[in-house]
Amino acid sequence: MIDRISLELNISPRQVAAVARLLEEGCTVPFIARYRKEAHGNLDEVQIGAIQERLAYHRELEARRETVLSSIIQQGKLTDELKARILACTTRTALEDLYLPYRPKRRTRAMIARERGLEPLAERILAQAEGDPEAEAAAYVDAAKEVPDVASALKGARDIVAERMAESSEVRGFAREWLATHGTVRSEAADPENAQPTKFEQYYDFSEAVATIPSHRFLAIKRGEAEGVLRSTLEVDGDPVVRKALELFALREGSPWADHLRTAAEDAYRRLIAPSVELDVAVELKQRSDRAAVEVFAENLRHLLLQAPLGERSVLGVDPGVRTGCKCAALDATGKFLQNVTIYLSQGSQREAEAAMELLRLVARHRPYAVAVGNGTAGRETERFVRRVLRESGNEDVLVVSVSEAGASVYSASEVAREEFPELDLTVRGAISIGRRLQDPLAELVKIDPKAIGVGQYQHDVNQTLLGAKLDEVVVSCVNRVGVELNTASAPLLTRVSGIGPAMARKIVDYRNEHGAFRSRGELLRVPGLGAKTFEQCAGFLRIRESENPLDRSAVHPERYALVRRMAEDAGFTLEHLVGNAEAVGRIQASRYESDDVGALTLRDILDELRKPGRDPRAVFEPPAFREDVCTIEDVRPGMTLEGIVTNVTAFGAFVDIGVHQDGLVHVSELSERYVSDPAEVVKAGDKLKVRVLDVDLARKRISLSARPERKGAAPRGSRGGRDAGGRGAPRYGNPRGPRSQGAQFSNNPFANL
């Protein structure tokens, strides 16, 4: 297993074995990547995660192999050759192909033919010997056995031969590979005679190679099928498969049995091989598309979670509303809820004046560093109102920032929100969440199911188990990369820390509530049920800002505290003077401290951390600069140059928030002057991007953008007809974000909302 994984991933067997051993010991991927570098040779989280995934696959394969061998042994049909072939299988598909002839199955035509005594006649067809087929078949005619004539006898014999061919692993393997490399995906309207204009219209007469069709197009077709608008098939010329079967079963052109073997091969392909192999390839194509879509979602989520935080500054969160008013929630620098009010902006000048006074009273009382305004319905109008009120009152120093609301309603109605704020209305919880997202996006977004954040591609169409596992992996990776302040972290945030699950996170919070703030990392061991192994896995990722031990504020693991103290003593410094003193750390000669379990890689990490303890790897916060005169799609004009924020990256382009209620789409062909095959090479979620408006479709609320420099003398260009990266019709426009109440259903990918 280790050797196979080593070959698959191009990682040395020693490294694979080391990771396998650490995983068996109960270590997590973040812990292995950060604190066991010597053991595995400095592999990163992606490589370690891939090893973990392949270990699971091969263990499942081994379990299935044992089941297959046991079944064939019970049937008394296991030969040395078959056993060797089964043991040599490296994929589940190859194993199942070998097992197919021995798998218990429903009654087939070949079984019935065998029951009628026609197997010897089938063997004559397979032998391709001399003789007279009809004369020999006459001996098998028996009305009592339901073989009334020669034709029936030969047909039954061919059924046996056809099944034998269809169950040949070599034939099936060739057929599967042939379809995968030479097949075509075709789609058409489900009812061509009465096809109506729909968003799937580009797929009413569509074809593309199985080998090259991008994931987003295949998933769009499957979505159309699910909605009853499209039907699709996989098509391929089957003649090469028939020829291959005849070659493997030794067709002799001069044999009197040749036509029967040929007829059996054609029947085997049409009736038995093609339907099964088409299903196999369709499943693999769906899995391939799912994996690609999940990777897109995961990458977008990673960048979203690692957005630059405003930090520990007081904030006023505003949840815009038209009929029900704007909910405003004041938060202190740690995110603690202080006060809320509701202001009304769209119910006449009197109510608007009252809203201005209410807002100013809230600002005067709590002195927020920034106001976070949700970007949903009426978001830009609310943002403009807040800016005006602050400017006219002399509070220009207060930042006003538009914050994504995606998934906020999911949090507001969640059990986590009810536990945090049982006495507050859902909309007030939403305003608090909007404010906290500005302070620390990662800490707040971990409270929401990642699928509700809306930065994916077909998240509702892909395998949900695969998607959930990948997104959890991304969240855990981001949380542990940044680190968590133990004394302020919520239970959902602690749940994502290495080694800590939901139950232990709850125990930690309960202990903190009962005994007060943790004074050291070591105090974690007093939490009921938190043992040495859990402490080992989580301690390095937790920070205690107020701890007397400066190492508790850093990413140095407690298992290395004694080593760091020795370094400080040898250098003539106190621990407090060493930590954070780059000049003092520079005097330490790392090689002096190398040992069997502490190598150069670990020492380098320790010294880097001592120079800048607890350093946040995220960027410094810079507010986006939306144009104040561009608030709705009606304000957008072709030729405008705007600054926006990338909200979603898909296989065919990037969606950009330019400060109106609809995201615009920068098609992959408009992302750069050079050729771009993958938009993720150029932009990522959260990036600031200067864009030029190419086209505005008010009727369909679509905005087409370009990030390419404008060529002098060129007129603003309109849409190119919705061609995607492969030259086929993926929409080139953004989509309305929609009401925030649709958080779990919304995706910025236009296909996902078809």
Image (cartoon, rainbow, N blue to C red):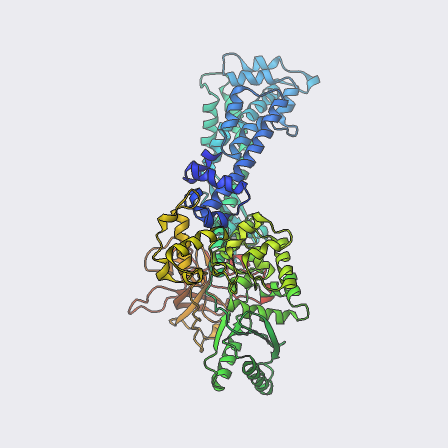
Q: In the picture, residue 350 is in which quadrant?
A: bottom right
On the image, which quarter does residue 564 sit in?
bottom left
Q: Nearer the viewer, residue 474 or 585?
A: 585
Looking at the rendered structure, the number of numbered marks drawn on it comes to 0
Residue at 68% x, 70% y: name it: 423
Q: In this view, does 195 lie to the left or right of 181?
A: right
Looking at the image, which residue sits at the far left? 712
Q: Residue 367, relative to residue 507: is it above or below?
A: below
Query: Residue 489: percent from the left, percent from the top?
Result: 57, 62
Quarter occupied by the C terminus: bottom right
Q: Residue at x 53, y 13 (%)?
A: 132
| Residue 389 in picture, x, y percent from top left | 51, 83
Q: Quadrant of residue 514?
A: bottom right
Please state the horizontal and vertical placement of residue 425, each as a whole percent of the image. 66, 71
- Is residue 265 visible from the viewing direction of this image? no
* Residue 204 in the image, given as x and y percentages of width and height: 51, 52
Q: Does residue 81 lie above or below 308 as drawn?
A: above
In this rendered view, identify the residue nearer to me: 587 or 341: 587
Say which of 661 and 327 sits in front. 327
Residue 249 seen by the camera: yes
Vertical comparison of 260 with 556: above or below: above
Vertical relation: 142 (above or below) 720? above
